Image (spheres, rainbow, N blue to C red):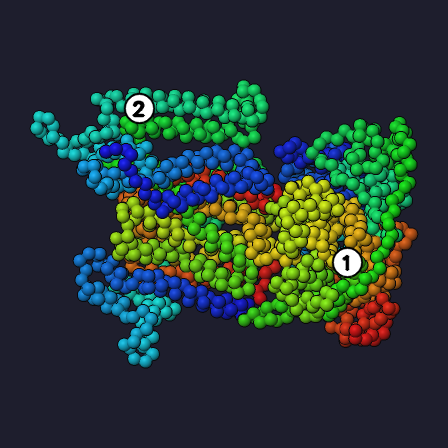
């Protein structure tokens, strides 16, 4: 099988994610030239808590982006002229990176760093007799001859090696940052290093490096230990839990971002129009969002997802692969969440625009005979963007949390898809086992908590910088 | 006042019609009764007879909007739209897929839902206001800073973990209370206490932070400066002046959710096996029982609208500036 | 006996900021004697309010604790007191009233409760005794119907009433010192006269001292015994009132007087103080005023002036009066010369805008189906004419409908009835594109320079917007040149176009707004209180600019204002509005020198005057302006009118023509006629 024979199969969500990335990059380029946009972002950039959480978020995003380039490998072909067939399995770049984790599948549950399976099995001994005991794992700690005696030392040695490597990488990074800053500020290299260390730089580089350092050490530990052991254990079908939580990152990010992307046009356009035009336009828009928001959110989502589910199951021919089907469901979940969640922002914007339209500069534009849509585009939209931004970052963490609950309720992402909600849901059913299977839950908790916490802290920093009411204090 | 309430009720009608049409669209047009039957009976090996049978048993065999076979007015009334959708207005919810009367089940399950939701709301309110007040007293100190960070940390934990963690710790390790189940009467207490504690703790983060923002906003206002200028004590300023004003947004925020308490809390109820409306809804979703989901959607909307009206009325009660017109 | 009540020595207060301390109050010293009124005069940002808050130790969080110096009240240093002991001083020995009576009262507590609280705290009164005392206090501050008012909430009271309640709260502790921080700035001039009167009378009755903080020279003239002028965190001059008004010593004080508009200065340019107040983030080593002072020479920029007392108690901080420093010759000469302005008064070029019986009614919805239950008659039949190259001032107190009238003339608010003719064009009949095409000739300048420009657009784009919409100025290059020319015309550098509004001060922003209006070459500009948000020295700059532009370009202004001295300085014709209608109109001479309507007379008499000789007897108006929802039957003014007659209660008076240019609606001058 040659490595070149692959076919890229961009999923719908992949396309949208990269579109979103492009929009963000374009915005950054646009904002660089505009002082009023830059000054507020600069305030975000000065916040220690905000930048530390941004580093964490960026690492998550990097994993998510790697997991958003999908392709299918060619299956071995017979003869030169034969048609190329592609595997039914859709892989992502992340899958390739994580091949050691992905392919080392045990029989069933095993605890973190275990060398033996969780459950006893009948085993045939070389002498023909059979005993009931915990069998060795096929992969986890398979390199150890005498696991009971060697495991501790092996883990320690591997961990030390990983930590040292991480420290070395961090040192290089620290010097790199100091060097760049030295050139930019025209300082000596040593002075610059001192400043970075003591946090005397404009951006809190020391905090950012520290955060990244912690992540780097954890990452290196996982990389080194992960190929020898199952760091977070394995699940019911023996799959590595670390692999699952990493794959779940993309699901969480997609729900958190694409949902907002879906709802923004509705919320922004309708909210501004309702507030600006008033009259019957306002009545219709108000009616629409009152009606939608009067239905309890979970029920509306459930109703729509159930409907969708029926549709998908009655039309199996529409989807090439399982991945496509799961992806379509994810996308529709985002759309459905978007439909149910735009009302809050819309109402907020309507109120703000109603205040703004009486402000003098809008009156002045009217006095110049500027057209309605120019007023909306030039005056109203830029002056409500801070509300949009704040609500986008605030919504993100709520949506990641919502995914877990929805999956529990049974109207979340496709059961075949890796997601924290599915992991929790599966692990919950095993709560009654003795001894308890705690590792799936713990892993999902750690990864989800880290993402949501950093998103919350980051959104606090953004809000402090952009909310005019908070800025006054 | 009365005229206002009547007018708000009248406004509610088009909204409920909208909700009704939306559910009709979702449950009968996008998803035909045929599809429903196929889902219920299993996707494969379904005979057309079985489907027709299933539909007839549940009254889904009629046309959607217009019944040309029926005589007179029944051309319109003997249809799915009228019998299944419009009937909701009369609170005729019909039967679930397993043949039980939905209206009866809802009545039965309201009490357990309330037994859980009301204490969570009240205790949560008390705890959150206390914490927020405490943080506000120490505003602009490290207590405030770390209080907020703690709130953010608490907010960042999924409610599922609160439930699983609480169940494990209190129910399984300490074995203080039963992990799940429910009993009527006074026994309900021991089943409800754990979910109540978890519900309250789960809400502390966001609640405290939200109330803290309200308190701080009030503390920054001019009238508070006047109160200080009078030489009042900190206790008087905070509890008499600030709290009284802050209670306006807090109370009205509570009032809007009051009616929705009847709907119960989805996740907690189902985790703890409390036979309330929340777990009823979840069970219905899991068994894809559209009749129940439809009934709950409509009920939820009605309660939400009642909540909105109550909010407006409560404003006039707590805020002397607001008069209904 | 020691008659000094409060002695402030070297008081310093600073804010913490990321760029180091901001020295809001930078070493000030003054004494307040028992029973006297001491005025602290200064423009916005000079640190006068921070001084008051420092005395009370009510500083905002960023400045809390950042106070040094001595504040000695009757032998006791307040700054040395712990917070708990300070609470016994606040509201008891020192009371304070604030600028914004609207927001300074707790909206959810009744008036009686808020006054009673002070009694409970400091006088240990409660129950019936407290209630009786509250009623006494309400009576003392002149609140009618006190039994009912006592149980009402603040929102049920008018602005003037609220300030009276604030005063009652302050009086409850029977303080030795009352700090009044701009107590009348948010109030209308007739209400201001009432409140100032009340304060003076209370001072006589109780013998308390008043520390009056204000920016208004007129208020100082009427109230103060001693005056201290603050500039950039510093006291630059201090004197007894009579001395100060007779001969202000500091160049800054002199400029403040010179920049006041008024009748005497018609046809002349007002004196202006160039530049702006220096940043308080720096440590001053020289004179703070040097950069803006026209007498400044090397010494002023090199060393800080000492506190000098050239004339007895009259102190000043300026090198001009320092015997140790000799000023160069030319500086002393410069003091005499005053700039004169070219006097041409462009003659009337015929009627440009004719407004006839203009009405703007806002419907009030009520009841089950939101029927229209009534109307807010904001503008209720206004007729006026605006001539080419002339200025008509529309004068009235807040809520009289003058701004609504201005916007309705421009069709920014569509009128309910009446006509607005511009040339031969009926503006009320136009809509959509047709109206848009004519917007070019009619422009507006707003009151608040902070909200009148989109904060997210550059100044150049802001000015260009109207040109694009009206297709003025040709291609991009032409427009660019025109923007440069406009900015130069209003006294700004062309480079300003690449900057954002927030980088400019209030006065500069107002200049940009003027440039924006000029960009489309309008014929008429509605100026909606364009200077009332500005300090008096900046106001002078803007008035000079507007005047100059009128002379050069032949613009017509509809000048909406409540400031009589601005009217005297700038306007040709005046129309006085009361409750949606014009009660008197005529030329400036007609209306201001020879006011006929009792309301106009009262309004003019209430304006505080800096000129001691021409002090007029203040005609006190009772009560407040009624609501425009249901104006009183008959003449709208009759409930407050000192000359009310029986017929005033029955029907609204018609026009009486007193002279060719002077009309009034009042039965005192005959039955009148329909126009």
Question: Which residue is depicted at the point 72% across and 30% down?
Answer: C283
Secondary structure under badge 2? helix
The picture quadrant where one finds residue B258 is bottom left
- Residue indicated by mark 1: C556
Q: Would you say C142 lies left or right of B324 here?
A: right
Give how far across and how far down residue A53 sits, in percent. Answer: 47, 36
Residue nearest the viewer, comparing A253 with A321: A321
In terms of secondary structure, where does tag 1 sit?
Answer: strand
- What residue is shown at x 28% (from left), y 33% (from top)? A3
| Disc 1 chain ID | C
- Between marks 1 and 2, how big is the CA–CA gap? 88 Å
In percent of width and height, residue B153 lies at 45, 39
Please identify the residue farthest to the left as the structure is shown.
A128
Q: Residue at label 2? A: A155
**Quarter of the image that includes the C terminus of chain C:** bottom right
Report if residue C389 is visible in the image: yes
- Residue at point 84%, 39% (across, down): C251
């Amino acid at each position: 099988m040659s490595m070149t024979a692959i076919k890229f199969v961009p999923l719908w969500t992949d396309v949208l994610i990269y579109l979103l990335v492009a929009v963000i990059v374009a915005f950054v380029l646009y904002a660089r030239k505009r002082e009023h946009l830059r000054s507020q972002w600069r305030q975000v950039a000065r916040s220690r808590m905000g930048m530390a959480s941004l580093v964490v978020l960026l690492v998550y995003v990097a994993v998510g982006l790697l997991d958003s380039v999908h392709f299918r490998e060619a299956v071995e072909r017979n003869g030169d002229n034969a048609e190329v067939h592609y595997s039914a399995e859709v892989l992502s770049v992340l899958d390739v990176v994580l091949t050691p984790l992905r392919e080392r599948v045990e029989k069933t549950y095993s605890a973190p760093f275990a060398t033996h399976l969780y459950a006893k099995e009948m085993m045939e001994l070389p002498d023909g007799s059979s005993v009931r005991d915990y069998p060795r794992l096929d992969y986890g700690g398979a390199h150890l001859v005498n696991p009971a005696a060697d495991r501790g030392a092996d883990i320690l040695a591997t961990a030390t090696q990983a930590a040292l490597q991480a420290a070395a990488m961090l040192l290089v990074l620290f010097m790199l940052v100091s060097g760049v800053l030295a050139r930019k500020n025209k300082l000596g290299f040593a002075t610059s290093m001192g400043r970075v260390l003591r946090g005397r730089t404009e951006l809190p580089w020391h905090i950012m490096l520290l955060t990244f350092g912690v992540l780097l050490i954890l990452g290196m530990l996982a990389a080194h230990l992960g190929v020898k052991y199952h760091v977070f254990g394995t699940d019911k079908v023996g799959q590595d839990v670390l692999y699952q939580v990493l794959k779940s990152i993309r699901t969480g990010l997609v729900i958190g971002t694409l949902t907002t992307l879906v709802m923004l046009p509705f919320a922004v356009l309708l909210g501004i129009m309702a507030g600006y035009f008033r009259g019957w336009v306002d009545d219709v828009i108000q009616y629409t969002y009152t009606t939608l928001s009067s239905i309890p959110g979970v029920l509306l989502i459930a109703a729509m997802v159930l409907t969708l589910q029926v549709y998908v199951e009655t039309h199996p021919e529409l989807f090439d692969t399982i991945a496509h089907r799961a992806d379509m469901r994810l996308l529709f979940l985002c759309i459905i969440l978007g439909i149910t969640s735009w009302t809050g922002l819309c109402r907020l914007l309507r109120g703000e625009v109603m205040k703004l339209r009486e402000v003098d500069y809008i009156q002045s534009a009217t006095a110049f005979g500027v057209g309605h849509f120019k007023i909306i585009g030039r005056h109203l939209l830029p002056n409500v963007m801070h509300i949009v931004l704040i609500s986008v970052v605030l919504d993100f963490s709520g949506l990641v949390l919502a995914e877990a609950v929805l999956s529990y309720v049974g109207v979340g992402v496709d059961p075949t898809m890796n997601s924290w909600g599915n992991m929790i849901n599966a692990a919950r059913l095993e709560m009654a086992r003795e001894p308890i299977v705690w590792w799936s839950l713990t892993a999902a908790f750690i990864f989800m908590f880290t993402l949501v916490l950093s998103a919350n802290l980051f959104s606090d920093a953004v809000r402090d910088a952009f909310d005019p009411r908070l800025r006054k204090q | 006042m009365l005229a206002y309430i009547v007018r708000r009720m009248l406004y509610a009608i088009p909204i409920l019609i909208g909700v009704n049409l939306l559910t009709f669209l979702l449950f009968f047009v996008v998803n035909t009764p045929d599809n429903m039957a196929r889902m219920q009976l299993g996707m494969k090996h379904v005979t057309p007879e079985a489907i027709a049978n299933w539909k007839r048993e549940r009254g889904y065999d009629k046309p959607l909007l217009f019944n040309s076979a029926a005589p007179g007015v029944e051309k319109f009334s003997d249809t799915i739209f009228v019998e299944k959708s419009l009937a909701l207005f009369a609170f005729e919810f019909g039967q679930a897929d397993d043949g039980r009367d939905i209206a009866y089940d809802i009545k039965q399950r309201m009490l357990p839902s309330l037994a859980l939701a009301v204490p969570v709301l009240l205790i949560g309110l008390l705890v959150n206001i206390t914490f927020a007040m405490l943080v506000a007293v120490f505003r602009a100190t490290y207590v405030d800073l770390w209080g907020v960070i703690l709130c953010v940390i608490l907010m960042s934990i999924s409610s599922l973990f609160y439930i699983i963690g609480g169940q494990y710790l209190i129910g399984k390790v300490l074995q203080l209370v039963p992990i799940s189940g429910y009993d009527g009467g006074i026994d309900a207490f021991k089943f409800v206490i754990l979910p109540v504690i978890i519900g309250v703790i789960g809400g502390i983060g966001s609640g405290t932070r939200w109330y803290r923002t309200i308190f701080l906003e009030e503390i920054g206002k001019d009238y508070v400066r006047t109160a200080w200028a009078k030489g009042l004590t900190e206790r008087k300023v905070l509890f008499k002046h600030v709290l009284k004003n802050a209670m306006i947004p807090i109370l009205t925020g509570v009032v809007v959710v009051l009616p929705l308490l009847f709907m119960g809390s989805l996740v907690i109820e189902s985790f703890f096996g409390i036979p309330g409306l929340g777990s009823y809804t979840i069970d219905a979703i899991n068994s894809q029982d559209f009749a129940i989901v439809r009934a709950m959607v409509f009920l939820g909307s009605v309660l939400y609208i009642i909540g909105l009206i109550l909010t407006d009325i409560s404003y006039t009660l707590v805020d002397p500036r607001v008069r209904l017109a | 006996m020691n008659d000094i009540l409060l002695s402030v020595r070297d008081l310093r207060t600073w804010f913490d900021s990321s760029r180091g301390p901001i020295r809001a109050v930078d070493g000030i010293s003054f004494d307040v004697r028992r029973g006297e009124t001491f005025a602290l005069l200064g423009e916005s940002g000079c640190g006068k309010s921070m001084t008051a808050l420092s005395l009370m130790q009510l500083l905002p969080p960023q400045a809390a604790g950042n106070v040094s110096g001595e504040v000695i009240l009757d032998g006791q240093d307040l700054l040395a007191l712990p917070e708990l002991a300070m609470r016994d001083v606040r509201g008891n020995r020192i009371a304070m009233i604030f600028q914004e009576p609207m927001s300074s009262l707790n909206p959810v507590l009744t008036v009686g409760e808020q006054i009673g609280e002070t009694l409970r705290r400091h006088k240990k009164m409660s129950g019936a005794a407290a209630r009786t005392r509250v009623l006494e206090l309400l009576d003392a501050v002149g609140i009618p119907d006190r039994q009912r008012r006592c149980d009402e909430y603040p929102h049920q009271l008018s602005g003037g009433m609220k300030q009276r309640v604030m005063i009652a709260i302050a009086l409850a502790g029977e303080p030795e010192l009352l700090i009044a921080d701009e107590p009348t700035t948010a109030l209308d001039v007739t209400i201001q006269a009432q409140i100032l009167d009340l304060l003076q009378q209370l001072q006589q009755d109780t013998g308390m001292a008043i520390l009056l903080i204000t920016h208004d020279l007129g208020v100082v003239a009427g109230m103060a015994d001693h005056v201290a002028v603050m500039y950039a965190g510093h006291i630059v001059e201090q004197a007894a009132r009579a001395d100060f008004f007779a001969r202000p010593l500091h160049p800054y004080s002199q400029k403040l007087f010179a920049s006041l508009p008024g009748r005497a200065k018609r046809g002349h340019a007002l004196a202006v103080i160039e530049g702006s107040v220096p940043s308080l983030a720096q440590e001053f080593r020289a004179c703070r005023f040097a950069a803006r002072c026209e007498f400044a020479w090397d010494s002023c920029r090199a060393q800080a002036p000492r506190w000098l007392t050239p004339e007895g108690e009259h102190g000043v901080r300026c090198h001009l009066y320092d015997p140790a420093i000799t000023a160069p010759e030319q500086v002393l000469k410069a003091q005499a010369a005053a700039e004169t302005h070219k006097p041409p008064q462009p003659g009337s070029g015929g009627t440009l805008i004719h407004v006839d019986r203009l009405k703007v009614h806002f419907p009030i919805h009520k009841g089950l189906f939101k029927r229209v239950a009534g109307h807010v008659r904001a503008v209720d039949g206004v007729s006026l004419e605006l001539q080419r190259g002339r200025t008509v001032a529309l004068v009235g107190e807040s809520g009289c409908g003058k701004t609504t009238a201005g916007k309705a003339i421009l069709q920014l608010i569509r009128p309910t009835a009446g006509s607005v003719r511009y040339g031969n064009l009926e503006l009320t009949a136009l809509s959509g594109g047709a109206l848009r095409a004519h917007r070019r000739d009619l422009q507006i300048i707003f009151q608040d320079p902070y909200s009148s420009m989109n904060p997210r657009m550059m100044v150049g784009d802001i000015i260009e917007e109207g040109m694009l919409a009206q297709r003025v100025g040709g291609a991009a290059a032409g427009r660019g040149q025109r923007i440069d020319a406009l900015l130069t015309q209003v006294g700004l550098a062309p480079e300003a176009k690449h900057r954002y509004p927030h980088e400019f001060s209030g006065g500069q922003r107002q200049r940009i707004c003027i440039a924006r209006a000029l960009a489309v070459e309008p014929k008429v500009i509605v100026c909606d209180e364009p200077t009332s948000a500005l300090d008096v020295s900046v106001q002078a700059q803007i008035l000079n600019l507007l005047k100059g532009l009128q002379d050069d370009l032949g613009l017509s202004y509809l000048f909406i204002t409540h400031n009589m001295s601005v009217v005297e300085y700038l306007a040709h014709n005046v129309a006085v509005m009361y409750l949606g209608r014009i009660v008197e109109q005529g030329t400036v001479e007609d209306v201001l020198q020879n006011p006929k309507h009792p309301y106009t007379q009262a309004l003019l008499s209430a304006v505080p005057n800096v000129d001691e000789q021409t002090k007029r007897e203040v005609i006190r108006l009772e009560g407040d302006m009624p609501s425009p929802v249901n104006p009183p039957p008959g003449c709208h003014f009759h409930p407050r009118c000192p000359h009310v007659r029986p017929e005033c209660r029955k029907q609204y008076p018609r026009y009486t023509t007193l002279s060719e240019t002077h009309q009034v609606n009042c039965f005192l001058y005959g039955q009148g006629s329909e126009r």
